[in-house]
Amino acid sequence: MAQQHTMNVVARIHSDFPTKFGIPRQSGLVEELEARVVFEPEYRRTEAVRGLEEFSHIWLIWQFSQSVREDWSPTVRPPRLGGNQRWGVFASRSPFRPNAIGLSAVRLVQVEDHPTLGPVLHVAGADLMDGTPVYDIKPYLPYADAHPEAIGGFADRVERHRLDVDCPARLLEQVPAGKRAALLGVLAEDPRPSYQVDPARVYGMCFAGMEVRFTVADGRLTVLELMAAPQ
């Protein structure tokens, strides 16, 4: 019988993604994305993050809170392969795992001493949905965590492509200036599932309080409309 352990949620992330659709597939792919890590009340202790500001990057250990299941499958269909091949769950970063745990390396921009929220971590490049529970935070250690000679398995055999993004200036002006580069970066990473290639299909993605509607054809993403996201 599997042992059961309880993990405490120490913080939650606040990002521009209210839903899963559109979130980059890995952390660090869109460096312009900004988010905040806000500690739960019982962990709002300044001394708990003492020295963290000396590190440029941190690890976030978190829960795929929208993907928790009672059962699990030993194989998954990685989206990098278009969902057409099955690989072992432990050879993937699929959210559908025996324990729905995620791991992200993000850049630490600032440790803010907030008057009511305590220490707040401002990070860049996070691939987490708004409200995601964070179980732990650890400093990234270049001498131990960076392996330039590492081999990426089947992920290395899939060419990474970025889309050309066509967003009319009149639409982009509706986006707050500080979030425009992040939005364009997210769109260039191709938010669609890999198996969806219908050029006539109109997609909708929520980002920073807006709904972005777009199409993709011949390697070009065209933004059709920007509007206030439904509440």
Image: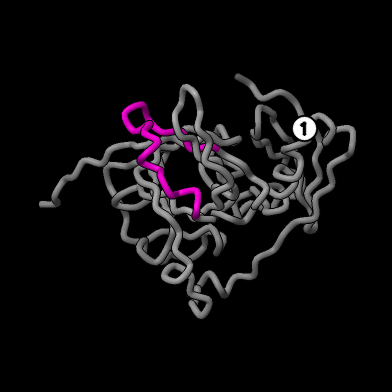
Q: Identify the residue at image location x=35%, y=63%.
A: 90
Label 1: few (<14), some or many (≥20) within 10 Å? Answer: some
* Residue underneath mark 1: 175
Q: Identify the residue at image location x=75%, y=26%.
A: 227
Residue 78 magenta-drawn?
A: no
Identified by mark 1, the residue type is: Val
Rendered view: 38 above or below 221: above
Outermost residue toward the bottom?
A: 149
* Quadrant of image for the C terminus: top right
Image coords of residue 102 (percent x, y): 41, 51
Q: Identify the residue at image location x=39%, y=41%.
A: 134
Q: Identify the residue at image location x=49%, y=35%.
A: 120
Image coords of residue 83 (percent x, y): 52, 59
Q: Quadrant of residue 28?
A: bottom right
Q: Is residue 142 left or right of residue 6?
A: right
Q: How is the image coloured?
A: one colour
Q: Quadrant of residue 225?
A: top right
Magenta stretch: give its range: 36-54
